Image: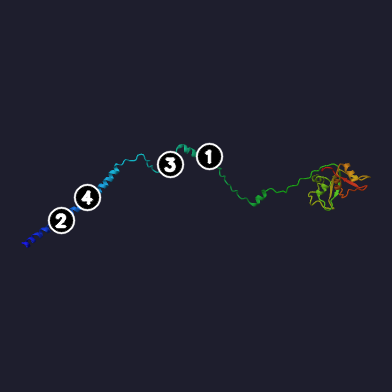
Amino acid sequence: MSENENRNRRPEESSKLPYLSLGVLVLMIAGLLYVGYEYIADDAADVDQLLNTPLDTTGRELQPIPNENDQLSTVPQSSKETTSSTTDEKTSDSPKEEETVTPTPRPADEEETKKPEEKAPEKPKPVAVDPGGVEITHTVQSGETFYGIANRYNLKSGTLKGLNPVIKDESTDVKSGVTRIKVRVQAVHTVGPGDILRVVAEKYGVTVGQLMAANKKTKNFTERGEKLIIPFPEKK
């Protein structure tokens, strides 16, 4: 009996195995479906939250980036007028570029013929003057100059040049021992008894120094019969 019972039980137990595996599969599928449902529910909640949130109408609207053509078209008419006026002023104030004209070269012979002859500046001609007084002739001595002779006789250099128009160049035409220069003096005085230099100077209104310079005296001394040259009291 025991062997028969064992034989009868084994097929029953083996027949239960497919049901158990089927139950396990069903449970696994149900678990997977449950987990998938939770994910789907979470996504749906997020979507509902996004759809139910109100839009922020107080914020600034995004503006499109303007193009260069749009900016040029939106410039107001007044600004265009001001810019055009400023550009006109700048163009009017700016100096115009002068047109450079390159002269055509001319032959050297033609330029030389057209150039005026350069003349040396002429020295002014001495003007003949008449300071009055008495004319004497002075022979240039060694070491004397034209201007020194004029100072000796209390004459201006221009006056002495006017009296001697032959002398063109004072440095070359005046030679010692050769050149004779015409000089004008106040008078020529012959020394008499008692005529000392002081007395003669007072008589003609000159100083003793002027009298000594005109006669090349180094000492205040005169001799009877000596002829004294009397210069002008002021330069003539």
The reply to whether dot 4 and dot 3 touch (C-beta < 8 Å) is no
Quadrant occupied by the C terminus: top right
Q: Distance between the residues labelled 4 and 1?
A: 84 Å
Q: Label 3 sits on what residue type?
A: Gln
Q: Which residue lies furthest to the left in this view?
A: 1
- Report the side of 106 relative to 124 (left or right): left
Q: Label 4 sits on what residue type?
A: Tyr
Q: In the image, which disc is placed on residue 89?
A: 1
| Residue 86 percent location from the top left of the image | 51, 39
Q: Which of marks 3 and 2 is in front?
A: 2
Q: Nearer the viewer, mark 2 or mark 1?
A: 2
Numbered marks: total: 4
**According to the image, label 2 marks what residue?**
20
> Secondary structure beneath disc 3?
helix
Disc 4 or 1, which lies upstream in sequence? 4
Classed neighbour count for the residue bearing mark 1: other residues with Cα under 10 Å, few (<14), some (14–19), many (≥20): few
The reply to whether dot 2 and dot 1 touch (C-beta < 8 Å) is no
| Residue 50 percent location from the top left of the image | 30, 44
